Amino acid sequence: QVQLVESGGGLVQPGGSLRLSCAASGTIFSITAMAWYRQAPGKPRELVASIAAGGSTRYADSVKGRFTISRDNAKNTVFLQMNSLKPENTAVYLCNAVYLGTTYWGQGIQVTVSS
């Protein structure tokens, strides 16, 4: 059973930073593609950043240069470093894994950017 557990969310002021973590279990993490999505109230879920098993990354245009996705295969964990946060980045952030052709989701974690 694949499980994804997010941590690191919370309330931050505009211009601040947060680092999200997603710990995975039940997979061979090194061959698992990982990603972060987000969903704001009334809006569709959108891809924020992804990192392939080989380490290649992709980002939504709106976060390029501010967010960095990385992975630590020894700790079965993927990270999302978010800098220069804006109020429009407020959303529930969800960890996503694709392992052996099946997609898995974490419960999601709230990120609120507000003064």
Image (cartoon, rainbow, N blue to C red):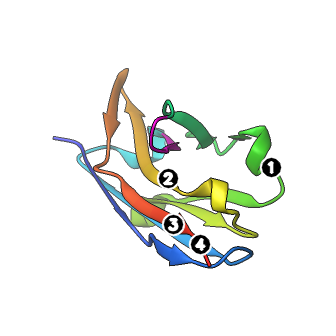
Q: Are marks 4 and 3 in contact (CB under 8 Å)?
A: yes
For badge 2, the amino acid type reads Ala
To which residue does mark 4 refer?
114
Residue 71 as seen in the image, left or right of residue 55: left
Q: Which residue has dot 1 on it?
A: 64
Q: Which residues are magenta?
A: 34-42
- The secondary structure that most of the magenta stretch takes on is strand
First of labels 4, 1 by sequence position: 1
The answer to whether any part of residue 51 appears in the image is: no
Q: Which mark is residue 91?
A: 2
Q: State which mark lies toward you, 4 or 2.
A: 4
Q: CA distance from mark 2 to mark 1?
A: 17 Å
Identify which amino acid the numbered label 4 is placed on. Ser
Q: Amino acid at mark 3?
A: Thr
Mark 2–mark 3 Cα distance, whole angstroms, equals: 7 Å
**Image quadrant for the C terminus?**
bottom right
